[in-house]
Amino acid sequence: MIPRVSLALGALGALALFAACGKSAPKAPAMPTLPGMAAVAPPTITGNDPRAALFLQKGCPNCHSITAFGVKSSSEVGPDLSLAYADVQQRFGVKLEEFLPNPTGTMQMVLSQLITLTPVERDSIIHILTQLHEDQEHTQPDNH
């Protein structure tokens, strides 16, 4: 828990630095939109987990909520990415590490035409979603 706090405090410090310099804080880039979804409202963000930044920059909340980070999609077209690690295996029969580099279905179109991920971004997303899954497993009561 301490690393998250220090990262959040670091982000707050950066915002304070911008304010002190008389510059406004950098704005998040406009999220890419799917055809026909230009009128989708931006997501509601109630959390401050710095791990959400990559998902926000890439536009994932146009379709997906990430409830573990306090990010709620206004459209909720896709499943909650907080559960993606287990959901991908259940729905597609492959691990997230295999699916994200070679997606199928809607995500094949999205990740080839609308959202491009560098290998580093893809690996970061896999790491974050795996970490979320592990966090969820540790907080669930033992069912034995």
Image (cartoon, rainbow, N blue to C red):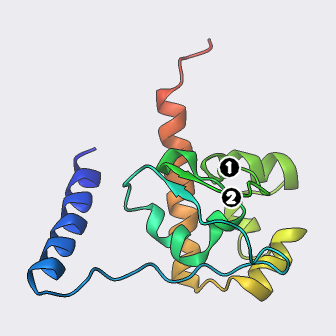
Quadrant of the snapshot with the N terminus? top left
From what the image shows, is residue 67 above or below residue 8? above
Q: Quadrant of residue 77?
A: bottom right
Q: Position of residue 118 (x, y in %)?
A: 58, 86
- Amino acid type indicated by mark 2: His
Whether the residues at callouts 2 and 1 have beta carbons within 8 Å, the answer is yes
Q: Which residue is mark 1?
A: 80
Q: Earlier in the sequence, mark 2 or mark 1?
A: 2
Mark count: 2
Quadrant of the snapshot with the C terminus? top right
Does the image show residue 90? Answer: yes
Secondary element at image label 2:
loop
Q: Residue at x 54, y 55 (%)?
A: 44
Q: Position of residue 122 (x, y in %)?
A: 59, 75
Q: Position of residue 119 (x, y in %)?
A: 58, 83
Q: Residue 41's mark?
A: none
Q: Is residue 121 left or right of residue 28?
A: right
Does the image show residue 104? Answer: no
Q: Position of residue 134 (x, y in %)?
A: 51, 42
Q: Residue at x 14, y 87 (%)?
A: 22
- Amino acid type indicated by mark 1: Asp
Q: Is residue 78 left or right of residue 118?
A: right
Q: Is residue 81 left or right of residue 57?
A: right
Characterize the local packing of mark 1: few (<14), some (14-19) or many (20 or more) Cα atoms within 10 angstroms: some
Characterize the local packing of mark 2: few (<14), some (14-19) or many (20 or more) Cα atoms within 10 angstroms: many
From what the image shows, is residue 39 above or below residue 115? above
Q: Residue at x 38, y 55 (%)?
A: 49
Q: Which residue is mark 2?
A: 64
- Outermost residue toward the left? 20
- Outermost residue toward the top? 144
Camera-side residue: 25 or 133?
25
Secondary element at image label 1:
loop
